Image (cartoon, rainbow, N blue to C red):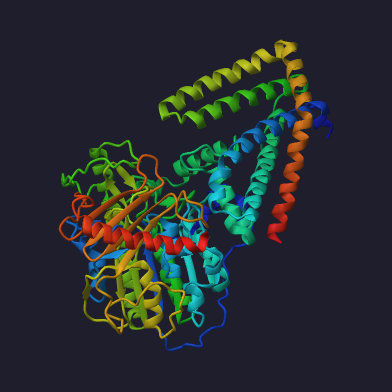
Amino acid sequence: MPLNISRRDFLKLASLLPLASTGISASNPTPRNRRTNDHAPNVLIVVFDTLSALDLSLYGFHRQTTPHLARFAQNATVYHAHYSSGNFTSPGAGSILTGTAPFTHRAINMLGSVEESFTSRNIFSTFDDYTRIGFSHNHLANLLLYQFQAHLDEFILPDEVAIVDFNFADDLFPNDYSIASQSERRYLKKPGETSNSLFLHSLLMFLKNIVDRYTLKQLRESFPRGIPGFHDMIYPLEDTIDWITEQLVQWPQPFMAYLHMMPPHDPYCPRKEFVDIFQDGWEPIHKPKHMLSNSIFPPDVLDVQHRYYNEYIAYVDSEFGRLHTFMQEHNYYENTIVVFTSDHGEMFERQIFRHVTPTLYQPIIRVPLLISMPQQTSRQDVYTPTSCIDLLPTLLHLTGHPIPTWCEGMVLPPYADQELPQERSIFAVEAKNNPKLSPLRKATVAMIKGNYKLIHYRGYEGYDGVYELYNLRNDPQELQNLYTTHPTIASELERELLAKIEEKDAYFR
Amino acid sequence: MGTFYKHFAKQDLFHLGVVCVFLIHVWAIINMFHDIPAMLLYMTRNELIGSLAYNMLFALFETIIVFLILVALGLILPGRWTRSNFFPVSCYLLGELTIMIILLKILGFRPYSRALLGGICIVVLILTALVVPKYSKMSELARSVSTRLTPLTAVYILIDLVGAIIVIARNV
């Protein structure tokens, strides 16, 4: 359902925030004159936020959520055991962009940023002979992109594609985007908490309701569960995909673009034709409530939300399909490396809802990864466990760039000159409530090695120093904690995990 | 200007400003202190100071907006009524609205409770507008409270101005 420009312009005016149009954009619309690498392939990294691999039909999920991604996979390498290194955007995207784990880059807190040295050690600084573009709907990812903007030719904020935008700090304070936008959010829009504003918050909510109810009436019919958007913006994915197709033609080649779309992050708002397509009565295995569960919702409510999530994924997939078709028709696959991935997953089990949780179970850290090489004509499948920190060294390797020593990841198969070590350990870290530059005292760390996964919880009241050990091959649902029944393997993995934490903490003592 | 002063006494505008500054800033500062422990987790000292500066600047902006809305309302109403009743009625209305909004924020009412609270709010506001002008003691009380709050609000304004300077420094 493409939207025409004139309506968008009209709606932008109707957003009743004239302040938003008076400032200066944070993007730098004139790419620097690079092109020193004219024959190099473009790199397009497409990130869909909150996309769990376990909910994709591409990876065997029974609901047909991703037929278009399967089409893309026909000419791509599909990674079947790919892990995000965190359970929300800051650590996950931070790892994709720096090629390091969260206990190194330290974007571990909500609204967090990477440790200072990574402002010049990231994917954009390494592709310095490319036109480098960063775009995200997600405010947390934008905080990272803002940190890297010295190495970005274009840092594009989501108001570029929003039809309603109730954010003003990005326009009024472009030179201090990070702190200004965080302060704005804290003052006016703290989700689920009391905002610092007494009257302005209510006034803003009132205006938003008016805009939502009256000016978006037509759009509401197309999106019965709400119009996709987040962070006080409304941006149907259709508009973003249209915008990307327009930009692809304009970006000077070779380009390296990081495009981070918010859907299928909640709220789950599929287009009309995807609503209720999965009313199949399916009930997942109901797992026992976790000690650190964040949800008061009973399992049947979570099942409904899970279905809504799957329907939203199907909508996202159809839009990705449109982008894929455009790129096919315009021969972009001839000279572009296309990466499809996500920053973290989503959860509807153990009475844990969504992804703001101290846990690191499979639905929340197993994410899709597909890499399509220029002129690739067949599908390849890789089953070796891989991490999102591997993406940066892989892309550098594929484009002939040197891999810097600070990069912790490894070149992915089948592109590596050597195979990945069999007993390689992959880490995921959750440490929202740990001080950024301090040793990990309140955190969850998961280590995947071979068939085993060890999860360590530290600093949680009533759940401190707890370990969970699962055999992912025999027990992919992570139901049987083997920590006490398999003491040998447990202690071996525990030693390695603690040594790793100790090694990383040493920098922050 | 003549029309303006037909509606408002200078002293009343000053007192109303004081009440606006006080209510908005107290709430903003309480919440700001509530946020500081979380902000300390990941912010440097400069970032923290910057964030607090924006908070105070936004509070100043909100104060001006609320003050202007009340003045605009006063200009719509008949001049004679406004001149004698504008300050006490606005002052009590602001106080009541503040209590209602804080209740809404803290208790997180569900939609039906919100509608109920909204209904109660409208009744209370109408009653205030009718009752306050009839009792001069209520006006005196509002004025005396406002006078006592003046030194404190001066401190708030001073902090706002420091915040504004910090914000400007961060953006140039």
Task: Count every numbered label the image shows and give the total.
Answer: 0
**Residue B144's image quarter?**
top right
Q: Position of residue A191 (x, y in %)?
A: 47, 43
When the figure is inspected, residue A391 is found, relative to residue A286, above or below; the finding is below
Q: Residue at x 27, y 81 (%)?
A: A376
When the figure is inspected, residue B151 is found, relative to residue A224, above or below; the finding is above
Give the side of residue A506 with respect to residue A355, left or right.
right
Q: Position of residue B117 (x, y in %)?
A: 49, 23
Give the side of residue A40 with respect to residue A183, left or right.
left
When the figure is inspected, residue A153 is found, relative to residue A201, above or below; the finding is below
Image quadrant in which the N terminus of chain A is located: bottom left
Observer-nearest residue: A36 or A224?
A36
Q: Residue at x 59, y 52 (%)?
A: A168
Q: Is residue B124 at all visible to an observer of this figure? A: yes
Q: Position of residue B149 (x, y in %)?
A: 75, 27
Observer-nearest residue: A59 or A137?
A59
